[in-house]
Image (cartoon, rainbow, N blue to C red):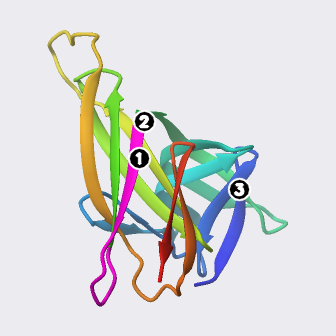
Amino acid sequence: MKFKTLKLFGAQLLVSGLMASMLHTASAQSDSVLYKDGELTINDAIVVEAGETKYYSGVRLAPTANGDFRIVAAAEKQMAYINELSVAVSFTDPVEVELGVVGYMSNPCVDMNIAVSRKGNTFHVAVGETPLQTLVACAQVTEPFDITFPLDVKGLPAGDYLVVVNGDEIDFTLE
């Protein structure tokens, strides 16, 4: 898979192919990047800058005269706090890899969002929060979570891989 690098917020945004990247959510649903009416729309974007992971939604970019893109709109998501990471690699054919993430959300009135992208041997995972629209007061206590979801390793060669989740790292080996 070829990757094209765009500059976004002074950092690199990973976009695969000819502006047609797929970012996967925990529900295994994926949204394509859309270029329409002179605007590039990316539903979820993982931005890595100086080792820090950020997660944006609703990113809209417009081309400039010199072929770059300028940001038209983007909403930064608050990142969930990560306590523990685990990776389980099956010995089946085809091999399957599951990522386990334990942490907490800032409060119980947020929805969890997950985006996954891979460049080379590194999976970038962002676990973010979207505030729920509620008419009642929300208790300001942290909300723990423990989730497991598959990483798409179909067709990947044997080797060592790194998974970066909100800046925390874990590795695994495909044999």
CB within 8 Å, label 1 to label 2: yes
Q: Earlier in the sequence, mark 3 or mark 2?
A: 3
> Residue at the spot x=25%, y=36% of the render?
145
> Residue at the spot x=35%, y=46% of the render?
101
Q: How many dots with numbers?
A: 3
Secondary structure category for the residue under label 1: strand
Q: Could you say which disc has been placed on residue 93 in the image?
A: none
CB within 8 Å, label 3 to label 2: no
Residue 123 belongs to the span the image colors magenta: no
Q: Could you say which disc has been placed on residue 82 in the image?
A: 2
Q: Is residue 74 left or right of residue 12?
A: left
> Residue at the spot x=22%, y=23% of the render?
108
Residue 65 spot, x, y in % from top left: 81, 65
Secondary structure category for the residue under label 2: strand
- Residue 35 visible somewhere in the drawing: yes
Say which amino acid is labelled 2. Ile
Spatial CA span between label 3 and label 2: 23 Å
**Of tags 1 and 2, which is closer to the observer?**
1
> Residue at the spot x=77%, y=63% of the render?
68
Residue 4 spot, x, y in % from top left: 68, 73
Q: In this rendering, is residue 147 above or below 102?
A: below
**Of tags 3 and 1, which is closer to the observer?**
1
Nearer to the camera, 132 or 50: 50
Q: Residue under circle 3?
A: 12
Secondary structure category for the residue under label 3: strand
Spatial CA span between label 1 and label 2: 8 Å
Say which amino acid is labelled 1. Leu
Q: Residue under circle 1?
A: 85
Q: Earlier in the sequence, mark 3 or mark 1?
A: 3
Q: In this rendering, is residue 168 above or below 30?
A: above
